[in-house]
Image (spheres, grey):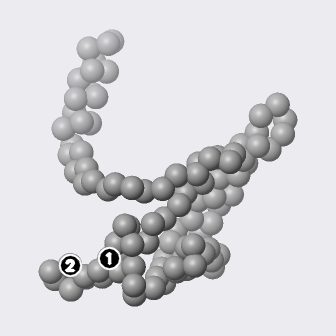
């Protein structure tokens, strides 16, 4: 299991971790790490509870920072819900493909 820190407010445990190197002109310029997070420990101070009693991380209290590349970082300042697309997008894509042929 590979562990990672969460800005001093928690820790993650990952399995099935893969490392991918991005190259430019024969040089490795970045490494992408993808893993399955199987366990997360966070301070109780950054959590909340739903009406059903489920614990969740309150991002405004946690204030996560992400590295975007090079020296560029970002903060989550706003969250929103986006419903997952249903099967209609697959049907639409199939119709578009047929129309192009």
Name the N-terminal-most of marks 2 and 1. Answer: 2
- Decide which of 47, 60 is in the foreground and name it: 60
Residue 21 percent coordinates (x, y): 73, 48
Horizontal arrangement in the rendering, residue 46 relative to residue 53 (left or right): right
The image quarter in which residue 76 lies: bottom left
Image quadrant holding the C terminus, namely: top left
Q: Is residue 38 above or below residue 98?
A: below
Which element is circle 1 on?
A: strand
Q: Report the residue at 28% width, 28% height from top.
A: 93
> Residue 1's x, y, as percent?
63, 79
Judged left or right of residue 39, residue 99 is: left
Spot the residue most to the right. 26
Compared with 44, 17 (above or below) is above
How many other residues sit within 10 Å of disc 1, few (<14), some (14-19) or many (≥20)?
A: few
> Which residue is labeled 2 in the image?
50
Spot the residue most to the left. 51
**Residue 39 showing in the rendered view:** no
Q: Secondary structure at mark 2?
A: loop
Q: Is residue 15 above or below residue 32?
A: below
Which disc, if any, is residue 3?
Answer: none
Marks 2 and 1, how far apart in space? 8 Å
In this rendered view, identify the residue nearer to me: 73 or 100: 73
Side (left or right) of 84 relative to 36: left
Report the label total: 2
Circle number at residue 56: 1
Q: Residue at x 37, y 67 (%)?
A: 60
Taking 43 as reference, is 36 above or below it? Answer: above
Q: Residue at x 55, y 73 (%)?
A: 6
- Residue 48 quadrant: bottom left
**Mark 2 crowdedness (10 Å alpha carbons): few <14, some 14-19, many ≥20:** few
């Amino acid at each position: 299991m590979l562990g990672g820190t969460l800005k001093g407010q928690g820790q993650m445990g990952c399995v099935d971790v893969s490392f991918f190197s991005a190259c430019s002109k024969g040089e490795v310029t970045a490494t992408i790490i993808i893993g399955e997070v199987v366990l997360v420990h966070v301070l109780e101070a950054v959590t909340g509870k739903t009406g059903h009693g489920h614990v969740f991380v309150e991002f405004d209290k946690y204030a996560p920072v992400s590295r975007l590349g090079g020296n560029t970082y970002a903060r989550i300042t706003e969250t929103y819900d986006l419903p997952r697309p249903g099967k209609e997008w697959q049907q639409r894509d199939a119709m578009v493909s047929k129309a192009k042929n």
